Amino acid sequence: MNAPRTRVQRRPVHGVLLLDKPLGLSSNDALQKAKWLLRAEKAGHTGTLDPLATGVLPLCFGAATKFSQLHLDADKTYEAVARLGVRTTTGDAEGEPLDERPVPPISAGKLAEIRGRFLGAIQQVPPMYSALKRGGKALYEYARAGEELHREPRDVEVHDLHLALVTTGDGAPALRMVARVSKGTYIRTLGEDIGEALGCGAHLVSLRRTATGPFDLSRCVSLATLAAMTEDERLAQLAPVDTLLAGHTRVTLGTEDAGRFLSGLRRRGPWPNAAQVAVYGSEPEALLGTAHVQSGELIPGRLLSPIEIQQILGSQEPQTV
């Protein structure tokens, strides 16, 4: 007879966990495992990584989930390896081969020319194997049913791109790509398009996100490392909620104005216009939420609740033994 499963006692947890997502897990699976390890009540992520991709995945807990959308627009950096000479149905190693072509000699000059062609503002046709919605269904659902739908090209930007010829583990010709790109850029599509430009086709065999916005791998923790920690050590891995608000203009309010701001009321002050503002109370010092300033008015955006603020302040107090 199986022993009953132990029920996890959830608790309020607030902050940002920078996870190094492992190979083979969906972003949601990784989120749920981290949520279970932290016994957190509420969690979300700032955009997804495919199961075949690894690397930086910021996870938001508690009050941080209110600001997770801000990082969907962040630039991202990827390292990828594309196998040359073979195209697949999905653009990566999960798909079935579509065709195989010989790989022509590729000079350093040719690589430089290709790099220049794909650097800067470009257009991409989103892949059928993507989560984009059409008629309430993800494109990959149509693709799995054997349907090919028309997709309009999208404007994206490749801010930086490095290309180098390498070989895969089994000695096949490949291209290593390091790309810093705007939101909405598909690295699989970039690899396929570069393969076509080289005249031989390509598909991704590995993909690793090394940075998203201000967060990079140096600050990440793996699920295995997290699982080996004590509960206090796990909580210590959380960055503050306002980590998500880097780059926002800071405004600090006195007690009376802070209370009114938290009630959703606009405040007047000598502030210059600003599109993104992080608002703090002064007594005690605590994040209240986001806002924007227009014509001297501080206009509330996403606000923390008084309960969330008290929980965050309580978690920052030194524990007595």
Image (cartoon, rainbow, N blue to C red):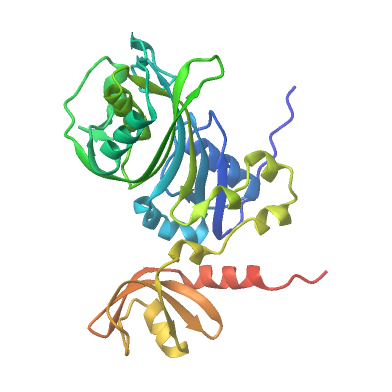
Which residue corresponds to the image point at 72% horizontal and 52% vertical from the top-left? 231
Does 119 sit above or below residue 252?
Answer: above
Residue at the right extreme of this rendering: 321
Q: Is residue 240 visible?
A: yes
- Quarter of image, res 119: top left
- Quarter of image, res 194: top left
Which residue corresponds to the image point at 53% horizontal and 32% vertical from the top-left? 25
Q: Quadrant of the C terminus?
A: bottom right
Indicate left or right for 259 with 285 as reference.
left
Which percent across, then down, holds residue 11?
61, 56
Indicate left or right for 31 with 152 as reference.
right
Indicate left or right for 71 with 227 as reference.
left
Which percent across, then down, holds residue 75?
38, 51
Which residue corresponds to the image point at 59% horizontal and 50% vertical from the top-left? 218
Does 108 sit above or below residue 222?
Answer: above
Closest to the observer, 80 or 7: 80
Which percent across, then down, holds residue 287?
49, 73
Which percent across, then down, holds residue 164?
45, 31
Which residue corresponds to the image point at 46% horizontal and 32% vertical from the top-left? 80
Closest to the observer, 43 or 186: 186
Closest to the observer, 125 or 252: 125
Q: Is residue 130 visible?
A: no
Does 276 sit above or below residue 20?
Answer: below
